[in-house]
Amino acid sequence: MSRWLLLLSALSVSAQDFDAILATIKADQAWTLEQQISICEIPAPPFKETERGKEFARRLSTLGLQDIRTDSEGNVISRWPGSQAPKPLIVFSAHLDTVFPEGMDVKVKREGTKFKGLGIGDDCRGLASVLTVARAFQKHNAKFNGTILFVGTVGEEGQGDLRGVRHLFNKELKGQIDAFISVDGTGTGLAARGVGSNRYLVTYKGRGGHSYGAFGMPNPAHAMGRAIARIADLQVPTSPKTTFNIGRVEGGTSVNSVPISVSMEVDMRSESAKELATLDERMRAAFQYGIDAEKQRWPNSKAPLDLEIKVMGLRPAAEPPDSLPIVQKALAAAKSIGITIFATRSGSTDSNIPMSLGIPAITIGGGGGAQGSHSIDESYEDTPDSYKGPQWAALILKALTEK
């Protein structure tokens, strides 16, 4: 008896056929890597994923996907033709964008089994995994008790603020999706919870003036410094893990001028929606403290000092239990092909959106190894068992379409 028989007995694809699908994915390990490299050499900077999206759509077409379209936000959406029922509707996705700005060298360089390139792991590996699963399904004419959509999303990284997946769930496919699987990065981790984040651009504004002649007025830089010092002293829980960071500061015109404007970019995160809201409130109090303390320092000055807070990104936190069927099926699928998962984890991925809406969702790794994610030294290690990443994804899709 096939070792997958119990897991897959209720599916349209027989256990024997599924053995063949998994064997094809393993045999296609070199092909998967070729897809990963070649698609990574198509630039996809934030908000400019169009060319990579077009190529991803073309490759999906050659692999037999149908009803291929690019929605108004830029997501590439396609339907597996072996879908035999409208429900359940499963979205199987990876994200098209990278964190790297336009104009950077995207050529992938090889050093033995290591491949160095911008986004080679995050998320070129995910995109290649999606294509590999499609190729194996095509070869064996796989059919399912449900509908599977193969999707490439935009705006997962940074200031993209999950704009692609937000559009899927709030507009394009609102109320239709029953489960969501994202392949993001490498390895075989399982993110079953969503790390929420609030990101702000905080600006302090004044009138400005000469550092000597106008001395005695509230200084926006000093106000921001007071706020930063207050923020640095905040205490946050270690469980649920909650963090904060000031990642970028800028402003001023010269060393001998009181700044007209200074700003900082603030990031706060938590696995808990409650703790994130609490931290947000304390952060805002610290922002205002900077204004109040600086004005008190110069009580006789009539010069203005103002605070402006702009939202850069809001990712919802979510804490669904590991007892959810999607998580248990993913764990069972991993075990069946020799993947050991000691514990599920939290992540900040496309899955945050469906999780926050109460829709079953997970994010998994695409196999292999990686170092230096989001850096110019990002690299991918093609391990002997890297094929297990896409195999795992295929198994989960099967399990989710069981009757």
Image: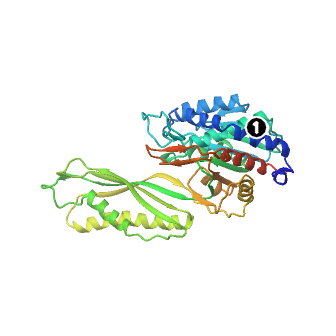
Query: How many other residues sit within 10 Å of disc 1, few (<14), some (14-19) or many (≥20)?
Result: many
User: At 74% across and 57% down in the image, what residue appears?
Assistant: 332
Q: Tell me the element at label 1.
A: helix
Tell me, yes or no, if residue 361 can be seen here. yes
On screen, residue 308 above or below 125: below
The residue beneath circle 1 is 137
Looking at the picture, how far across and down is residue 312, in whole percent?
46, 50
Looking at the picture, how far across and down is residue 99, in whole percent?
48, 43
What is the three-letter code of the residue carrying label 1?
Answer: Phe
Q: Is residue 46 left or right of residue 292?
A: right
Q: Is residue 228 left or right of residue 52?
A: left
Question: From this viewpoint, which residue is outermost toward the left?
Answer: 213
The answer to which image quadrant residue 16 occupies is top right
Looking at the picture, how far across and down is residue 256, in whole percent?
16, 51
Question: From this viewpoint, which residue is outermost toward the front?
Answer: 112
User: At 32% across and 57% down in the image, what residue appears?
Assistant: 306
Comparing 132 with 103, the one in front is 132
User: At 81% across and 35% down in the image, what residue appears?
Assistant: 141
Comparing 331 with 290, the one in front is 331
On screen, residue 386 above or below 336: above
Comparing 142 with 371, the one in front is 371
The answer to which image quadrant residue 146 occupies is top right
